[in-house]
């Protein structure tokens, strides 16, 4: 077998794992199955990912990076937090939810698998910590770039965004109805913007007391 750089091999195996997980589910996907999907020997698979937990962690991180990329592409972070929230939620739904129900089911399965597998509970906690942290950091950057502040901590805003989207996605996956889901997404967007209570910061040197 021709030599492949470790970073390239890792990406290849993570991509194969995402395909296998989306098709066969978390419980039905083994290291051997991912190796077969990637067309590599099991030994190569186990060298890069010695355990299923490490592979699942890498898959989650890959999904998180994809979400971060979508958020980054969705809005100009210099146009304010409200603009960013509105554009990002719409872009997220268009690129990662609509027509990608298998990806969303896979993520839910990763969570439930970790919660039910003895000793793997930390993986589920880490998964949602990463989701929330990525959204929170992105919101904070948008606010700071525009000289704005938020009425709630950015960490809380990130968790609420994730929780709200989770509920909408689960309903959509169970009963796909794009028109209804878009209307609900618009309502959730208004709720999140209202929760953020975005304020323009006073320029340096201004007391704001009149």
Image: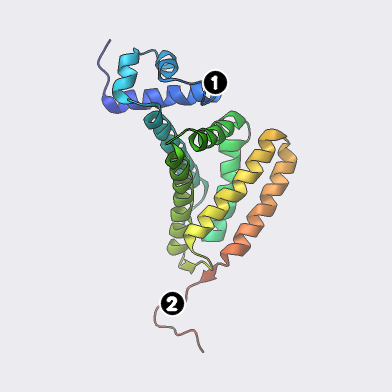
Relative vertical location of residue 136 with respect to residue 102 in this rendering, above or below = below
In the image, taking residue 151 as reference, residue 44 lies left or right, namely: left
Q: State the residue position of label 1.
A: 24
Residue 73: image tag: none
- From this viewpoint, is residue 79 visible? no
Residue 30 is drawn in which quadrant? top left
Residue 126 is drawn in which quadrant? top left
In the image, taking residue 122 as reference, residue 181 lies left or right, namely: right
In the image, taking residue 3 as reference, residue 64 lies left or right, namely: right
Q: Dot 2: within a 10 Å radius of its alpha carbon, few (fewer than 14), some, or many (20 or more) residues?
A: few
Residue ranking furthest to the top = 1
Residue at image point 59% right, 53% down: 86
Residue ranking furthest to the bottom = 210
Residue at image point 57% right, 44% down: 91
Q: Measured from the top left, where is residue 73 in percent x and y? A: 48, 44
Mark 1 vs mark 2: give the one in front. 1
Q: CA distance from mark 1 to mark 2?
A: 55 Å
Q: Measured from the top left, where is residue 37 in percent x and y? A: 44, 15
Relative vertical location of residue 149 with respect to residue 27 in this rendering, above or below = below
Tell me which numbered mark, 1 or 2, is placed earlier along the sequence.
1
Q: Measured from the top left, where is residue 43 in percent x and y? A: 31, 15
Between 153 and 118, which is closer to the camera in this rendering? 118
Between 183 and 40, which is closer to the camera in this rendering? 40
Q: State the residue position of label 2.
A: 203
- From this viewpoint, is residue 188 visible? yes
Q: Dot 1: within a 10 Å radius of its alpha carbon, few (fewer than 14), some, or many (20 or more) residues?
A: some
């Amino acid at each position: 077998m021709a030599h492949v750089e470790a970073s390239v091999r890792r990406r290849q195996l993570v991509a194969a794992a995402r395909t296998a997980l989306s098709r066969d589910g978390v419980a039905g996907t083994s290291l051997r199955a991912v190796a077969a999907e990637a067309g590599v020997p099991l030994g190569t698979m186990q060298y890069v990912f010695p355990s299923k937990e490490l592979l699942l962690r890498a898959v989650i991180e890959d999904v998180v990076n994809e979400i971060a990329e979508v958020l980054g592409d969705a809005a100009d972070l210099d146009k304010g937090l409200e603009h960013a929230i509105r554009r990002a939620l719409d872009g997220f739904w268009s690129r990662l939810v609509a027509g990608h129900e298998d990806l969303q089911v896979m993520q839910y399965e990763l969570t439930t698998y970790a919660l039910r597998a003895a000793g793997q509970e930390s993986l589920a906690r880490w998964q949602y910590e990463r989701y929330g942290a990525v959204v929170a950091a992105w919101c904070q950057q948008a606010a700071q770039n525009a000289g704005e502040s938020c009425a709630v901590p950015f960490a809380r805003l990130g968790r609420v965004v994730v929780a709200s989207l989770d509920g909408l996605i689960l309903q959509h996956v169970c009963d796909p109805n794009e028109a209804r889901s878009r209307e609900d997404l618009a309502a959730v967007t208004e709720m999140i913007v209202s929760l953020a209570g975005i304020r323009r910061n006073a320029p340096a040197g201004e007391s704001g007391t009149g």
